[in-house]
Image (cartoon, rainbow, N blue to C red):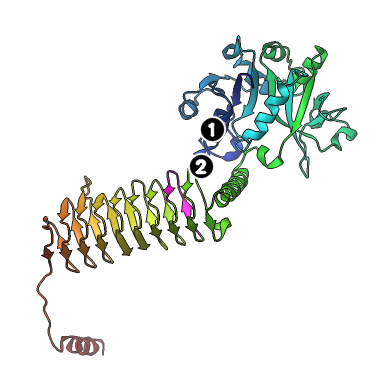
Amino acid sequence: MTAVKSVILAAGMGSRMKSKKPKVLHALGGQPMISHLMGTVSKISAETPIVVISPDMADVAKVVAPAKTVVQPTAEGTGHAVSFALDELDGFAGTVLILYGDTPLISEETLTQMINVREGADNPAVVVLGFEPEDPLEYGRLVSSSDDELDAIVEFADASEQVRKSRLCNSGVMAIDGAVIRELIEAIGNDNAKGEYYLTDVVEIARKADRTCKFVIGDELELLGVNSRVQLAEAEKIIQRIWRLAAMDSGVTLIDPDTVFFSYDTELGQDVLVEPNVFFGPGVKVGAEARIKANSHLEGCHVGSGSQIGPFARLRPGANLGTDVKIGNFVEVKKSDLAEGVKVSHLSYIGDATIGSEANIGAGTITCNYDGYDKYQTTIGAGAFIGSNTALVAPVSVGKGAIVGAGSTVTKTVEDDALIVERANEVQKPGWASRFRALKARLKS
């Protein structure tokens, strides 16, 4: 494979999204959709992509950096958009991929196939990616007189009834010979109903110059363009299914796959078991043989091998769990390091804490890490036992092997192997409750 450069068209604001945010920055699997495409491109080429944006799209430029961005000042068609990338392509004689920032699902395999055809013995000037949907709607059609040679691309409005009967549709994705891309693009005119410069015209221009054009057929699902919130949801379904199948193929058990949601960078080790209704936000890594129980939410965290999480647990960013850790139902952990064998079995909040190996945190325990202005650290030593309903007021340390009695509020350092009990003196008044009820009854009568 020779050198490949990509031009990604991302200038559309996406009015159908009804959003102040540029269309290509809407998230898919926890990542802007254009970032998915950038990741795919990076697998097939070390060349820096060129991204065509509109004015006032500094946020897009920031997301795609270090890719080069060029500005299309006015929207005058796809051919017009590509023309602003030509200066960045000067002297480049490899293959130029023309891609779309709102078509994030296209695969590495499909792009590689296009590149291989473009660089084949026939040396076609243009290779177009087609697809055959069940309902071709008003897509432009690819016109061909052979198995793979492309005669023309015809827009639906200009197509004859015979051409409209074809299910071979144009995706817009192209691979173009970099040696002639400037002359092809600069030859595009705007003598049409919309007065726009259509990229599809390069096929006719190349054919008139006696250059071959070809097409390959891709999967319709890969070529879903995201122009609305509905289509964004459809794309999410597709990519989640891809990731679920990949996870199971790698040795992960998903009891009910359709209820598990991954992010673009989720990593699950071999023999991980995931129960229904689990959500993995960005930045999650789960070690081998861990079990993520139902209705749990994980984000920005590491779960060590053999650990058990949930049900109904929440691991927030910075939660770093060692091996064989148990996080039980209705436990929340944030920005904390839990060493091997730690147990936080139920109804607790652990934030900004370091917990030593084999420590046991009783039900209802909270680390009081925030005073309204700053966050503070709690340290619990290895083998410590924290009784139920304990409040650890940070900054505070509990030593190795120490025991904290249930119901305590701990504000000072607890020494190794010490017992600390902090409770108010118990007061009991026999018969008080019955007298109280009697009084209330008389007052109501």
**Which tag, 1 or 2, sits closer to the chain's start?**
1
Residue 343 in the image: x percent, y percent?
30, 61
Q: Which mark is residue 264?
A: 2
| Prevailing secondary structure of the magenta residues | loop
| Horizontal side, residue 128 vs residue 56: left or right | right
Q: Quadrant of the N terminus?
A: top right
Query: Which residue is denoted by mark 1 in the rendering?
Result: 39
Query: Is residue 56 in view from this perspective?
Result: yes
Q: Is residue 363 above or below residue 262?
A: below
- Which residue range is magenta in the image? 277-287
Q: Is residue 15 above or below residue 149?
A: below
Q: Is residue 63 magenta?
A: no
The picture places residue 62, in percent across and down from the top left corner, at 45, 27
Q: Is residue 330 visible?
A: no
Q: Nearer the viewer, residue 400 or 378?
A: 400
Q: Is residue 166 left or right of residue 128?
A: right
Q: Residue at x 13, y 61 (%)?
A: 417
Q: Amino acid at mark 2?
A: Tyr
The secondary structure type at the circle numbered 2 is: loop
Relative image position of residue 123 (x, y in whole percent): 75, 17
Per the image, label 1 sits on a secondary structure element best described as helix
